[in-house]
Amino acid sequence: MARKSFTESMWRNDPWFKKLCKAVVECKTQQQAAEFLRDVGTLTELKDWSERLEMADRIMKGETYRDITEDMGVSTTTVTRVARFLKDGKGYSRFLKRKHGHHSHARERGERLASTAA
């Protein structure tokens, strides 16, 4: 049997993905979430997810792509992708707005940064 593939049009409705989301939401503490994520993700995946969230946080704080790239040792392509999801997506923004309060300039910065990255 072939492995499932995710597409932009169907990933949210995939029953396996929904089960994963439900399991994450059911974690009551940071330790439970860490233990769960370690069980379902490789160390490389955990590092990648952590780095992307850190990049989104830094973009939201107003750091430049160049500073993020140099400081974190990541590619500008990855920073640009994170910035695009920060601008167009819901996940990063929802979490980081709560973390920073509602005084973030992500939308204004996202549009300016996205236009300078091209």
Image (cartoon, helix red, strand yellow):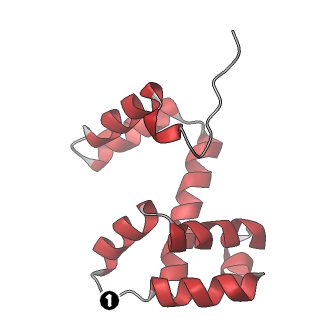
Residue hosting label 1: 103
Q: Which residue type does callout 1 highlight?
A: His
Task: Using residue 78 as the reference point, say whether residue 82 is left or right of it.
Answer: left
Q: Residue 87's spot in the image, x, y percent?
A: 52, 74
* 33 left or right, relative to 40: left
Q: Residue at x 65, y 30 (%)?
A: 5
Judge the density around disc 1: few (<14), some (14-19), many (≥20) Cα neighbours within 10 Å: few
Question: Which part of the image, by quadrant, shows the C terminus?
Answer: bottom right
Q: In this picture, is 94 found above or below 115?
A: above
On the question of residue 67 being in view, the answer is no
Element marked by disc 1: loop
Image quarter (top left, top right, bottom left or bottom right) of the N terminus: top right
Q: Which residue occupies the foreground of this view, 55 or 117?
A: 117
Q: Residue furthest front?
A: 9
Residue 52 x/y as whole percent: 58, 62
Describe residue 19's horizontal placement relative to residue 72 as left or right: left
The residue at the far top in this view is 1
Picture coordinates of residue 26 (x, y %)? 25, 37
Extreme residue in the left direction: 28
- Can the viewer see residue 110? yes
When asked about the image quadrant of residue 51, the answer is bottom right
Residue at position x 52%, y 39% from top? Answer: 11
Q: Is residue 40 left or right of residue 30?
A: right
Q: What residue is at 61 percent from the left and 70 percent from the top?
A: 84
